[in-house]
Amino acid sequence: MIQPAEEDKLVTQTRLRGERHNRWLRDGDPNVTQRLAQIGVLGWMIVVPMLIGVFSGRWLDHRFGSGLFCTAPLLMLGTALGCWSAWKWMQGA
């Protein structure tokens, strides 16, 4: 038996797929510059949280004199956050 929450998710995904297909029929394939812009945005979406993690980790390490104790975990956290946000953006685009 299908649960109502799963049914709603299926309906939502089906509607989203239909909207994407209709947009593709109306607009056609994106050109090269639009694709390059998407790649650039994806790169920045991943790199910026990583850099924020590194800089804030270095600042905390310098402040507390802890070597790389804060930098490494904040770099990993920034990487995970950047990849997650890029994934969510790709699912919506």
Image (spheres, rainbow, N blue to C red):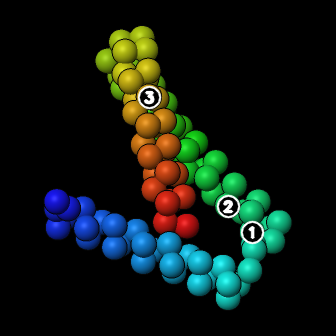
Going by the numbered disc 2, the residue's amino acid type is: Gln
Q: Are marks 2 and 1 in contact (CB under 8 Å)?
A: yes
Q: Which mark is residue 76?
A: 3
Q: Neighbour class for label 1 at 10 Å: few (<14), some, many (≥20)?
A: few
Q: Nearer the viewer, residue 13 or 41?
A: 13
Q: Quadrant of the N terminus?
A: bottom left
Q: Secondary structure at mark 3?
A: helix
At x 44%, y 37%, the residue is 80
The residue identified by callout 1 is: 34
At which x and y percent is residue 83? 50, 43
Q: Is residue 49 left or right of residue 65?
A: right
At which x and y percent is residue 17? 50, 72
Going by the numbered disc 1, the residue's amino acid type is: Gln
Q: Is residue 42 above or below residue 9?
A: above
- The quadrant in which residue 93 appears is bottom right
At which x and y percent is residue 73? 38, 24
Q: Neighbour class for label 3 at 10 Å: few (<14), some, many (≥20)?
A: some
Q: Is residue 74 above or below residue 7?
A: above
At x 63%, y 57%, the residue is 41
At x 26%, y 70%, the residue is 8
Going by the numbered disc 3, the residue's amino acid type is: Met
Q: Which mark is residue 38?
A: 2
Q: Is residue 84 left or right of residue 40?
A: left
Rounded to the nearest whole Å, what is the CA distance between mark 3 and mark 2?
24 Å
